[in-house]
Amino acid sequence: MSEQVGSPFTTKEISIADPLDREVLIDVRASGLCHSDLHIVESGYGFGFPGVFGHEIAGVVTAVGPEVSTIAVGDHVVGCLIQFCGACTTCLSGRTYECPNPQATLRGPDAPPRLSAEDGTPLAQGWALGGFAEQALVHENQLAVVRADIPFPQAAILGCAVVTGAGSAINTAGVRVGDSVAVIGTGGVGLNVISGALLAGASTVIAIDIIDDKLEVAKRFGATDVINSASVDAVAAVREIAGGGVDHAFEVIGLPATQEQAIALRKVGGHAYLIGIAKPDATVTLDTSLAALVSHASVQGVSMGSTNLKRDIPMYADLYMQGRLNLDDLISQEISIDEVDEAYAKLKSGEVIRSIITRF
């Protein structure tokens, strides 16, 4: 857990409530360290503190609330930070990732807290999941049932890194056979953009980063070309490879400089997708001249890969078990729950792609 914005992660004993209504209690078997949780702890973004974070979780259901209808004790499940009500017109049209009622997955103000400290102080539950823990209490809408033969570490990363990256290419961008793609940032999400683009049939997939070792990993995921933007002009290099620009440019870092770079990589009629979480005050400059308007190029923000978690997470689990989706190379190390801060330091330095807590 983290006590306040800017404080380190610490391991403490807390209390977790019994499931009510549509809640599901999970024994967490694996929990991935995503950069998003680190962003929240470092910058706040309006999240509650003190709180338990961690949103890439996989585990086994041990108890369910009386109104749960889609999940049973013993099911293997994967958590996802998409919160949706399932009843509004947005959800019913299939866009659960845009649900305007995320509070539907939370307890009401009159209910006791799901999590509390030893002294009884209520604890916030990051993304309504709180997966850096032995157990998690989660609304059934934030869980997908997956096949029992997928390993827990690989299953855990399906709920964020995979659905965000692969979903951005498959769902949001609608990459088609023969399209050209550039991906700026080859961490866990960026590598999954590459995987998604290849599953969709892209013929040219260009990986861009400043660390050669990460670009070598990108080749293992199927990148057809790699560019170290610390040593060459990435925009010029992409235009040379792709004949003037790409159909789809994905930015997965969250820096204004690389966001503007993605925008510059578009061909006429091309699209840029901003996936990485930027600092709260970050801005980019857009060209709105006549030349920009007639180019018919677009810029789109992307949240969670436009994912329907109930449909997509089991699908990606199947693709992995069929040998068609590389998850093994995303997992750099398995750690204990006491090693979160050290693992995040390695993530920030680019030493690892994903660390997974498997020892609680």
Image: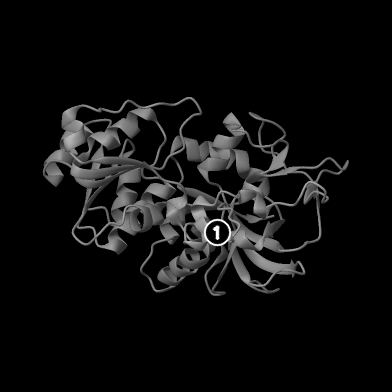
Q: Which kind of residue does numbered mark 1 sit on?
A: Ala
Residue 261 in the image, given as x and y percentages of width and height = 28, 33
Left or right, residue 243 beside residue 308: left
At horizontal 45% and vertical 41% (from top left) the residue drawn is 351
At horizontal 40% and vertical 31% (from top left) the residue drawn is 255
| Number of dots carrying numbers | 1
In this view of the protein, which residue sits in the foreground, 8 or 67? 67
Which residue, given by chain and number where applicable, does mark 1 sit on?
156
Left or right, residue 237 beside residue 259: left
Left or right, residue 328 beside residue 225: right
- The answer, for residue 139, to whether it is visible in the render is yes
- Identify the coloring: one colour
For label 1, the SS is helix
How crowded pointer 1 is (Cα within 10 Å; few <14, some 14-19, many 20+) is rated as: many
In the rendered image, the vertical position of residue 344 relative to residue 130, given as above or below? above
Residue 182 in the image, given as x and y percentages of width and height = 26, 45
- The answer, for residue 184, to whether it is visible in the render is no
Q: Quadrant of the C terminus?
A: bottom right
Residue 321 in the image, given as x and y percentages of width and height = 44, 72
At horizontal 47% and vertical 68% (from top left) the residue drawn is 317
| Residue situated furthest right in the rendering | 119
In this view of the protein, which residue sits in the foreground, 110 or 13? 110
Left or right, residue 352 beside residue 202: right
Q: Quadrant of the N terminus?
A: top right
In the rendered image, the vertical position of residue 251 relative to residue 151, given as above or below? above
At horizontal 18% and vertical 59% (from top left) the residue drawn is 178
Residue 99 in the image, given as x and y percentages of width and height = 54, 52
In the rendered image, the vertical position of residue 108 relative to residue 68, given as above or below? above
Corner quadrant of residue 251: top left
In this view of the protein, which residue sits in the foreground, 110 or 126? 110
